[in-house]
Image (cartoon, helix red, strand yellow):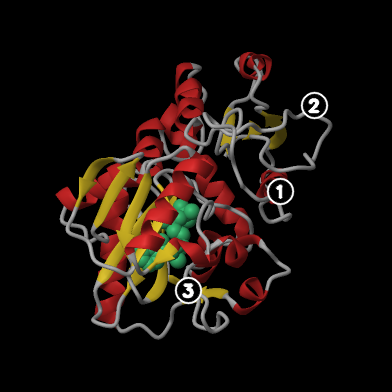
Amino acid sequence: MANLKITILHDVWEEGPPEPEPEPVKAPRGKSGKRSRKKKDPLHDREEIFEALTKLGHEPSYYVLDGKNQSLLALAKCGADLVFNLTESYAGDDTMDKNIASFLELLHLPYTGSGPQALYLAQDKSIAKKIFDFHKIKTPDFAVSYKGRTDHSHDIEFPLIVKPVSEDGSIGIDAGSLVDSVKELMERIHYIHEEFDSPALIEEYIEGREIYASIFGNENPEVLPLIELDLSKLPRGTPRIACQDVKFDHETEAYKVTKSAPAEDLDDDTTKKLQDTGLAAWRALGLRDYGRIDMRLNKKGEVYVIEANPNPWLSSVAEFTMAAKKAGYSYTDVIEKLVGLAQARSL
Ligand SMILES: Nc1ncnc2c1ncn2[C@@H]1O[C@H](COP(=O)(O)OP(=O)(O)O)[C@@H](O)[C@H]1O
Ligand SMILES: [Mg+2]
């Protein structure tokens, strides 16, 4: 692959940018100004990507979209051959990732990962679930409610989990998300409205194992070995869900006792069912290059799609990378393939 000028494009949710950059703005929360997002793992994937790109003989640089027009306009003139797109938000609004992808399209700048359509469909979990339903992909029955208005409702049964309809990183998901009574349900819906100014997605809770299917490539997308997030060792009385503590809070008991690892004890039929379901969800939403489909497997062997993640976290310890390693890709191989997939679109 020819030597390319590659810009690692990222936003400013996280602190401590790796290079001198424009003063980051304090990220406001979209419409309501409210937000309780925590910092991500301090191990930035962008630094590892930078290193891998250098190893591959490319010329990487960082570019931060700080939510100001100037950084957006300057991007048009950045002179990169390709953008490694790590953005998840714009000006603190994480529904805006699709707009960044659209902007890159308008600039004819090839970029890694999913396009605006898939980013939009996956971001709004209620839309994604309606599409899964159409394609007969099992997903928990659900209702969507916003300040007294019900957008849709199956005849759902407790226990239920209540989450913001379009957040990720387990924002708004904690022990209180799992509700067992009308009182708890109403309180939680109120909390989601107040805290996130977002419709509440109320889903049937699927007791079971948490399995991730990572998918890589486009023409013949490869379903990488399945990864399980083992939640069985969470302290007694804690719901078995991947809340923020589990994902990011290194100091917590919940973080320390939960581990992701290849799910090796699954029989062939179950493995195939999980892989096929993951791929069906990927195709239904039109994901591209790399993605991770989060699923639950219950005792009866039924597989439910919880959500689809375009452009998942790419750190060397992330589930996607773990799955790729299990399939024989080194970290550098993963980055090389992603660059190749993006570049192929511009040829
Ligand atoms: N319907 C559900 N049944 C069981 N667990 C769920 C359900 N929905 C969410 N969870 C738990 O909550 C976690 C986060 O939910 P998810 O919808 O994936 O949010 P995020 O987009 O923030 O990752 C999941 O990984 C899972 O552990
Ligand atoms: Mg998830």
The residue that label 1 is drawn on is: 55
Question: Decide: marks 3, 2 in contact (CB < 8 A)?
Answer: no
Q: Is residue 213 visible?
A: no
Sequence-wise, the earlier of marks 3 and 1 is: 1
State the separation of the CA atoms marked 3 and 1: 43 Å
Question: Decide: marks 2, 1 in contact (CB < 8 A)?
Answer: no
Q: Identify the residue shown where x is 65% and y is 51%.
A: 38
State the separation of the CA atoms marked 3 and 2: 40 Å
Ligand 1 within 8 Å, label 3 CB: no
Query: Residue 100's x, y, as percent?
Result: 51, 27
Q: Secondary structure at mark 2?
A: loop
- Looking at the image, is mark 2 or mark 1 nearer the viewer? 2
The residue that label 3 is drawn on is: 239
Query: Residue 169's x, y, as percent?
Result: 54, 52
Q: Quarter of the image holding residue 145?
A: top left
Q: Secondary structure at mark 3?
A: loop
- Decide which of 72, 185 is in the foreground and name it: 185
